[in-house]
Image (spheres, grey):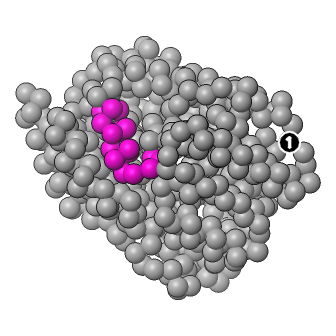
Amino acid sequence: MSDLVEKFGQHIDKKIARNPETARKELLFGYRAFDLKLKYAPDKRLSPSRRLLADICMKEHIRSFANAGNSALVSVFLPCEIVRAFGMSTIFAEGFSGYMTGAYAEKAFVEAAENAGIAETYCSYHKILMGAAFSGVLPKPKFIINTSLICDANNLTFRALADYYKVPQFYVDVPITADGDSIDYVAGQLREMTAFIEDNTGKKLDMDVLKQYAYRTKETLDNFRECLELKRNVTIPNDITSEMYEVFLTHPLLGTEDTLKYSRMLRDELKAAPKKSGIRLLWMHTIPYFQAPLRDRLNFNDKCQIVGCDMNIENLIDTDPEKPYESMAKRLVESGFNGSSENRIEMSLRAARELDVDGVIYFCHWGCKQTMGAAVNAKRHLEENGFPTLILNGDGGDRRNTSDGQILTRLDAFIEMLEDMKK
């Protein structure tokens, strides 16, 4: 299957420069074909909840890519219940680019962005997104909304794409101080964001619909927090792709009926799961799910597996559905990723303790200055508190910036060390 997909990507690569509209149609054809495979021939090693997860994410990617004109281009941490209450889909860099990489189609998009003047050292997720826009493969969205939270590229990519597409942009500024004043300030901006969407869609927000999303968000977050507690003592079949898929559900798809269904299914599976065994890892940052060494060592392996990712833990905050704006603002302001890198490190330390992991993998994604800059501090603090930490350098989007040999050598040595410590 991987050889077939790689040939498909090479075919698309040649089409992008010559005929971007054809490339887009053929990409959508490929995604729809794979969606049929997910439905009729799923990976039997995946649990029912993980199969549902893959299907939810694929359908959202197809829906937003096929109908970009009714989609909002957003940053990953934006609370999207408001957008979805208007019946719109979302496109975000990490998700969109991940699917392009999954189709072996990222190379042409990276080159299109770099040819337009984007630095080689820029975040690959954002380069792929910008290259898809500049090449004409990604049609213009309805509008762009992004936050200031954590990612430096947010402040550059979305401004550049708003200028390129000539579409309106709304910016949500998140103060680094986690207090009531900051929550009120961000809640006020989210109300302004609602007015922005109303102006650009010609529709009025139905508050009852927004509250339905808020109630589903609360139950979903409650379920995910319970899942975190349950994972401490059990093991379920897992793969690194599913950990990346979960970013869709813990962020832009939060509040949807599908996400709520998934959270219930995952909780019930964990309740019935066997007791934990093997080496247990916490992953920090995005995951290069396509890399063979990681897949070989960590997919469906009872002897060593990832039991959590900090990107799916950072916003598990109790909310009040009767105050949807304040609740969404609270998720941003009290996010484990808001403020200094020490906040993220402390959040990950708490998660490592709660999940009872044996070690932590800290992934320095190409172009992400935040993770690279905090790597040494994270390793030192986590190890001082009893959690051996491996820093891996790589790229979650562009295969050309990865080294399978180096990853394999370092990962195997780390796992062997943890096994010896566990004995």
Residue visible at 51% across and 80% down in the picture:
118
* Residue closest to the eye, 350 or 281: 350
Residue visible at 40% across and 19% down in the picture:
230
Residue visible at 76% across and 46% down in the picture:
191
First to last magenta residue range: 337-352
**Vertical comparison of 315 with 99: above or below:** above
The picture places residue 72, in percent across and down from the top left corner, at 72, 56
Q: How many marks?
A: 1
- Can you see residue 305? no
Q: Is residue 274 magenta?
A: no
Instruction: Give the image quarter of residue 401.
Output: bottom left
Main secondary structure of the magenta stretch? helix
- Residue 267 located left or right of residue 287: right
- Residue 423 located left or right of residue 130: left
**Vertical comparison of 318 with 398: above or below:** above
Q: Secondary structure at mark 1?
A: loop
The picture places residue 94, in percent across and down from the top left corner, at 52, 56
Residue visible at 64% across and 78% down in the picture:
135
Amino acid found under the numbered disc labelled 1: Leu
Disc 1 packing (10 Å; few <14; some 14–19; many ≥20): some
Q: Which residue is mark 1?
A: 205
- Can you see residue 110? yes
* Residue closest to the eye, 30 or 125: 125
Quarter occupied by the C terminus: top left
The picture places residue 364, in percent across and down from the top left corner, at 33, 58
**Which residue ends up furthest to the front in the rendered image?**
181
